[in-house]
Image (tube, coloured by chain):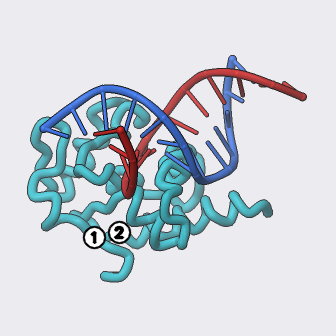
Chain colours: A cyan, B red, C blue
Amino acid sequence: MSRSDAFYEQVYQLVRKIPEGRVTTYGDIAKALCKEGAARQVGYALARSSSVSPPVPAHRVVNRMGVLTAKESFQTPWLMQELLVNEGIMIEDERVKDFELKRWRPSDG
DNA sequence: TAGTTGACGGCCG
DNA sequence: CCGGCCGCCAACT
């Protein structure tokens, strides 16, 4: 078990704690894991999350602006938005509407 | 083996 | 206001 594997697993566990209908950011996750500045690694971990078990709700993670930058990496580009809408999150121009209200922080859980 | 590429984000000129 | 740079570092070519 390398250091990075442990980091990935921590990312997955944290993302699984995001409540339905809420979203969080790469930066918040990195900071919560004491890796502030490594937001990019969080994104990389999530890019590989489709093959892990139990499943990771990676669609609930957006960038700091609330933009769905990850959508191109899902099975289909519209899947991410569809999943979020199903949870009651409104998307406007590839961005989470009322982002600050929907935003969830690890400290809330 | 070395170079490039990201599902990012803070900082600088 | 805004484009560009840099830290992060595993995966891929």
The residue positioned 50% from the left and 48% from the top of the image is A40
Crowding near pointer 1: few (<14 within 10 Å), some, many (20+)? many
The residue positioned 23% from the left and 43% from the top of the image is A82
* Distance Cα–Cα, label 2 vs label 1: 7 Å
> Which amino acid, by three-letter code, is at mark 2?
Ile
Chain designation of label 1: A
Where residue A25 appears, x then y in whole percent?
34, 58
Left or right of A97? Residue A55 is right
The image quarter containing residue A74 is top left
Where residue C10 appears, x then y in whole percent?
69, 47
Residue marked by disc 1: A104
Where residue A83 appears, x then y in whole percent?
27, 48
> Which amino acid, by three-letter code, is at mark 1?
Trp
Left or right of A80? Residue A99 is left
Mark 1: which secondary structure? loop
The image quarter containing residue A88 is bottom left
Up/down of A46 relative to A7, above or below: above
Up/down of A94 relative to A29, above or below: above
**Pointers 2 and 1 in contact (CB under 8 A)?**
yes
The residue positioned 55% from the left and 51% from the top of the image is A41
Residue marked by disc 2: A18
